[in-house]
Amino acid sequence: MEKDVAELIYSQKKEYARGKRGLVSVSEYRGKKFVIKEKLLSSAGVGTIKNEFLYNKKVNEFGIGPRIFYYDEEKDFLIREFVDGVKIEEWVADKRNSSFFKTEFKEILLSILNQARLLDLNGINKYELTNPHKDILITNKGPVIIDFERCRHTNKPKNVTQFLQYLTRPVMSGFLDEASIVFKKETAVLLGEEYKKDLSGEVYEKIKKVIKN
């Protein structure tokens, strides 16, 4: 994305959401919708927007996250694709009574696990998959993981194990029961502990098998 286009998109931004550290805005250009993220002036965080840009760019290389387009070093903002989706728990609440819920929910969980696995294999830890209700959006094309400002490279990534922890939370375990997925907390803990020793592909297949069944 050229700088003049980025500046035009930035100049037409409209506030969309405000968090503890950052401001999210939306803007449109030539019929396409974009997200603009920048740090709040009141935030003490340093380098979070640039960090998100760099990691979002990196994970795009293996098909994860919204497309990232631009980072402005001087004004410290990034521009990325707008993801037209709903939060995972809202999706489940809306679809749980549909005839296709079981099949679709399993496919979504497997897709998220596969994305978490790719992050693990590339040594990237997202740190937010233990409670990702705001970080996973379900679109017509499947789940999209967003928000990479806290990502770090590590020799011991924990994305798969973090997501397993999320699935054992009461709100998600209830949804798993409705989808006829028998995934007890004890099983998740044992598989997670075994998997994180060396990111075993064999153990990962066991985790997927629990979801598929």
Image (cartoon, helix red, strand yellow):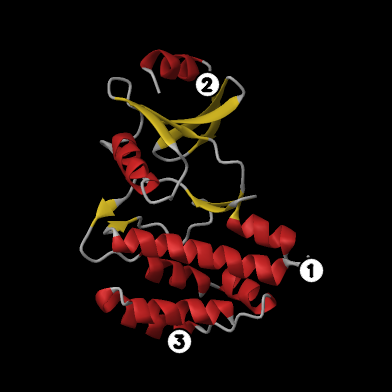
Q: Residue at x 59, y 57 (%)?
A: 88
Which residue in the structure is indicated by mark 1?
A: 99
Q: Residues within 10 Å of mark 3 (few under 14, many from 20)?
A: few
Is disc 1 in contact with disc 2, using a CB cutoff of under 8 Å?
no
For badge 2, the amino acid type reads: Lys
Judge depth for marks 1 and 2 and give the one in front.
1
Q: How far across and down, in percent of the image, does residue 21 sit?
A: 39, 38
- Say which element carries label 1: loop
Q: Residue at x 33, y 66 (%)?
A: 158
Query: Between disc 3 and disc 2, whose residue precedes?
Result: 2
Drawn side of residue 152 relative to residue 207, left or right: left
Badge 1: residue crowd in 10 Å (few <14, some 14–19, many ≥20): few
Q: From the viewer's perspective, is residue 22 above or below residue 122?
A: above
Image height of 23 relative to 107, above or below = above
Q: Secondary structure at mark 3?
A: helix
Residue occupied by mark 3: 186
Determine whether, in the image, residue 13 is placed left or right of residue 162. right
Quadrant hosting residue 75: top left
